[in-house]
Image (spheres, rainbow, N blue to C red):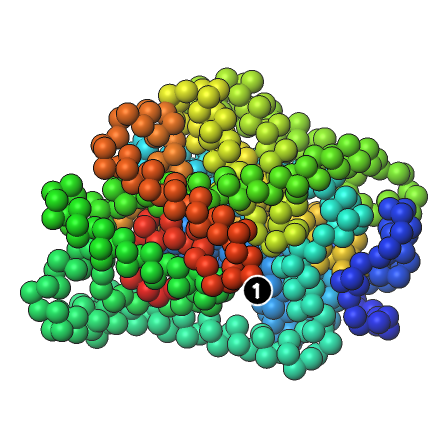
Amino acid sequence: MTLAVDATDERDPRLPVAGFKGTPEEIEREWYEEVYRGHGDSMAQLTWRAVLIGSCLGGVLSLTNLYIGLKAGWGFGVAITASILSYAIWTSLLKAGLARTPMTILENNCMQSTASSAGYSTGGTLISAFAAYIIVNHQPMSVPLMLAWVFFIAVLGVTMAIPMKRQMINIEQLRFPSGVAAAETLRALHAKSSEGLRAAKALGLAGLIAAIDKVWAEGLSMISASERFSSGTLLTNLQKWLLGAQYEAWSGRTVVFSWDFIFLAAGAITGMRVCATMFVSGTLCWAVVVPVLQMEGVIEGAGFAAIVQWTLWFGASCMVAAGLLSFALSWRTALSAFRDLGQMLSFRSAGASEPWHIEAPMSWFGGGQLVSLVALAWLGHASFGMPIWETAVAVALSFWLALVACRVTGETDTTPVGAMGKVTQLIFGGLSPGNVNVNLMSANITAGAATSAADLLTDLKSGYLLGANPRQQFLAQFSGIFVGTLVSVLTFAVLVPDAQVLGTDQFPAPAAQTWSAVAIALGKGLSSLEPVKLWLIVAGGVVGVLLTLAPVLFSKSQEYLPSASAFGLAWVFPWYYGLLF
């Protein structure tokens, strides 16, 4: 890595979002001649400062995604956030005299790739498969085991994206909207446009407000003398005064007002359709269905932990049915992905010929897949008694499903990680019936690999538009795995020391609840469940199917139709979270 200074770039500031026309060779040649900025190393890209600061930034962002995941079951891509923060951090260091030269736009792009890898692609399996394992087995995994699993799954996914990049980004020029947005953000920031600077200031202000809010909500509660002034205590006292004797009953059903700034932010990102669906569905669940089941004596006791053991079956069934049906409805996309597989794997490192010499070589793909396969096979066999052939099947299946997931991401900006995991769970429910742990860990491989691959392709799209060297950007992305794995796993071990904290008001862990429910249903059989839970599964599945088909049948009104995933999710976490969305 070099630490070169910036170079003046006088090319057209507009990004080639519309793409290029012609044969694959003509498209790649045109991009290389008109967009690529690395001729003669004229602009620094992969530097130590970019990787180090990107790793530190990604480590911090991984904490936010881990926290949101345990709270809401979702993870948010950090490409745009990382772009703004990476620029703001280095600009601040430059103004303070702690840095000598400004970063180039390609260095910022590398920093963003490293941060995105560390902050997003390494934590998804912790909030789903690993948390589900803890719920099912009532005991945590050892930290070294989690470190190894997360690291090698990330390596599997990142190297898996190498053949996909040239086909999906170079040749087909799929949009990958978040990648386009990240590139536009960096271009605006480096052009010193008012829009980019406003975005950086807004991000900093929002972070300051969130920090103050967290201190008010939880910081004051840590000091006995000031606890009565915390936002939680004030809200509780106000609602007790307003509701009187009814407060305890409705509080036990989570139908009270609580405050968490993070869900307001999440709602701003997800949009009104999802937010409205969560509120309506959550009200139906917690204010209508739950009281009825309590009056009938089906649900005994109060509190989120006791009630969610029943409601999660509707929510999980709704989300699984919606995810699998959406996957099935994308059969054309899947067919395109599989049809292009031969062309992807036919790409070879073309020595020093241009422009292919700047692409990540296929030898990296083969080496990464082989190392990951051997490591995961040994880990699966040693830790869970998983036969080696089952790990091989899981890795092979991961490639096929990641192929589809990455194409869906490129077209819609949504990675169907949940659906990919459920497909694997269903397959291994047949291959290894009754083995819940194997079911979870096999799906863990698939979902984790798909997440890492899609995240890399999103970052490579931003680099493609900015004229970055894809080989150097791959190395930046790969570098982020190390810090992301370490920070995510160690933090997860602190936040989730045992199964007691999962499925509670503090950490509802809806993704883990869904994964564990599917694993239990496939492992122990539906006959082991109470009749009411079976009816909830059927009802949730029907609702998930109907809400998924509705936008297809009524395409002109789809923005006003409920979201199937949001409808199911509202049954797996407290009512007040759905309200805040």
Q: Nearer the viewer, residue 391 or 257?
A: 257
Q: Nearer the viewer, residue 293 or 492?
A: 293
Tell me: residue 164, above or below residue 346.
below
Residue 295: x, y in percent? 11, 48
Q: Is residue 511 above or below residue 115?
A: above
Inspect this view and state whether residue 142 appears: yes
Between 569 and 376, the one nearer to me in the picture: 569
| Mark 1 element type | helix
For the point 53% across and 76% down, which residue is it?
202
User: Which residue is pictured at 80% across the width and 48% down the height?
Assistant: 171
**Vertical position of residue 142 compared to residue 174: above or below:** above
Q: Quadrant of the C terminus?
A: bottom left
224 vs 563, left or right, is left
Measured as percent of width and height from the top left, residue 182 is found at 65, 63
Mark 1 lies on residue: 81
Write the residue at 88% across / 38% down.
350
